[in-house]
Image: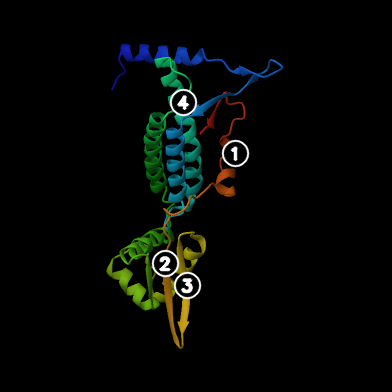
Amino acid sequence: MEIGPDTEAEYAGLYAKLSSLRMAEDEIGQEAPNIVPMSREARRLFKKIHDEIGRETLEPGFPLRLQGVWAKMRGYLARISLILALCRSVQDEQPEQVEEEDVKKAARIIAYFKAHARRVYGELRVTTPEDLLAGEISKFLRDHGGQWSGSATELYEALAKREVQGLPENADWLTRVALSIGDRSELLTVEKKRTGRKRFLKLSLKNGDTGVIGVTRREAGSDTSDTNDANPKEIKWID
C-alpha cells in the first residue's frame, strides 16, 4: 500500500512541529530535560499495564529468553505514551501532558510488538520442552482449582491423557522436571511429600493477579543498554 501525498504532507507537518519543540534550560543556561506530567487516569492505567507485563514473565512456561524482551516492553510503554502525547499536543495545541488515551494507544502498539517477538522467538525455537511442560502444568492446575496432589505416576497419566507438550518419558523424569520448574517459577510450587511410606507430589499455582508486582533488579538492569540519559523529554507522575 502506497502512502498518498496528503498523508505525506500531514506527517511532514507533524515532524516540523515536533522539531520545533525546545528543551528547557537550567539555572546556568544549559539544556535540561523537560518534565511532561501524567494525568491521574493515565498514571493509573500505565501502572496497571506496566504490572501486567511484569506478571506475564512470572507465568509458568513463559520462555526464559523472552524475559529481557518483556522488561524492555515496560520501558517502551512509557516512551511510546510520551511520543503519542507530544504528537497530540502539537497537533491540537494542547498542554504537554500524557493522557489516558495516549497510554491506551501505546498499549496497543506494545501488544503488536509482543506478538511479533513471540513469533520471531518461536521461529528461532527458543522455547524449550520444559517451558512447554510448565505451561501445560499451569493449565492443568487451573482446571483443578489451582492445586493438585497425588503420586508421580498419577500426575504422569493425567498429563499424558491431556496429550500435553514436553512430557518426559516416564513418571520419574516428570518428577525431576516438575521440581526444576517449581524452583525457577515464582507462581508455581512443586513439593515432594511423604505420608508414612507413601510418597506424593503437591502442586499449587499462585494467583498472579493479587498484589502489585514491582520491577526486580534483574528487570531494571536488563534495560540499561537501551537507556539514553540525554532524553529531552521525561514523564513525571502526578497525583
Mark 3 or mark 4, earlier in chain = 4
Task: Name, please, the residue furthest toward the right.
Answer: 28
Check the picture and name the quadrant holding the N terminus: top left
Query: Label 4 is placed on what type of residue?
Result: Ile
Q: What colouring method underlies this structural image? A: rainbow
Mark 4 Cα shell of 10 Å, populated few (<14), some (14-19), many (≥20) = some
Q: How many marks?
A: 4
Q: Secondary structure at mark 4?
A: helix
How far is the residue under mark 1 from the one under mark 3? 36 Å
Query: Label 3 is placed on what type of residue?
Result: Glu
Mark 2 Cα shell of 10 Å, populated few (<14), some (14-19), many (≥20) = many
Q: Secondary structure at mark 3?
A: strand
Mark 1 Cα shell of 10 Å, populated few (<14), some (14-19), many (≥20) = few
Q: Which residue is mark 1?
A: 224
Q: Which residue is mark 3?
A: 191
Mark 4 or mark 1, earlier in chain = 4
Q: Secondary structure at mark 1?
A: helix
Q: Which residue is mark 4?
A: 83
- 65 is higher (above) or lower (below) than 4: below
- 87 is higher (above) or lower (below) than 48: above
Question: At which x and y percent is residue 18?
Answer: 48, 16
How far is the residue under mark 2 from the one under mark 3? 9 Å
How far is the residue under mark 2 from the one under mark 1? 35 Å
